[in-house]
Amino acid sequence: MSFFTKNHGVATGDNLSNHLNDSAQDAAIVSQIKEICDLLKTRVSDAEEHSCADDKDEKMKHAWMLAAAVLDRISSIAFAVIFLGRTLVSAVSLYTVYP
């Protein structure tokens, strides 16, 4: 953690060995931070892929629901036309047979 707490000036004399140790620690910290950033980027891209897959599933679900609604509407109209047609045919045939 010396990266954030120690002064990073030019080392001279007795401080030279401490400065070299600090530089090695700083490099290790920077390396770890880069690894963390790479890991976060990977997780973000994975989350985006899952989000895209979920969006595709949602669109597919919506399309099937729309198709089902259209089929339901066509079926109900066909039933109504057949029912009314059969009723009219029955009424006309009864009227002509028994005037």
Image: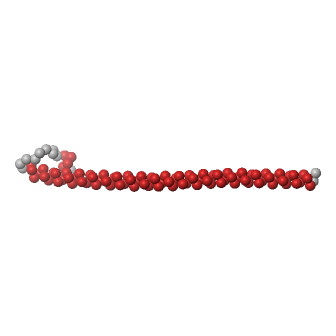
Report the side of 47 relative to 93 (left or right): left
Total labels: the figure holds: 0
Nearest to the observer: residue 70 or residue 5: 70
Residue 26 x, y percent position in the rendering: 19, 51
Q: How is the image coloured?
A: secondary structure
Question: Measuring 69% from the left and 54% from the top, which residue is drawn there?
Answer: 75
Report the side of 57 relative to 78 (left or right): left
Residue 61 x, y percent position in the rendering: 55, 54
Report the side of 90 relative to 15 (left or right): right
Can you name the residue that lies furthest to the right here? 99
Question: Measuring 52% from the left and 53% from the top, which residue is drawn there?
Answer: 58
Question: Measuring 85% from the left and 54% from the top, which residue is drawn there?
Answer: 90
Nearest to the observer: residue 53 or residue 17: 53
Residue 85 x, y percent position in the rendering: 80, 52
Question: Measuring 34% from the left and 52% from the top, which residue is drawn there?
Answer: 41
Residue 29 x, y percent position in the rendering: 22, 52
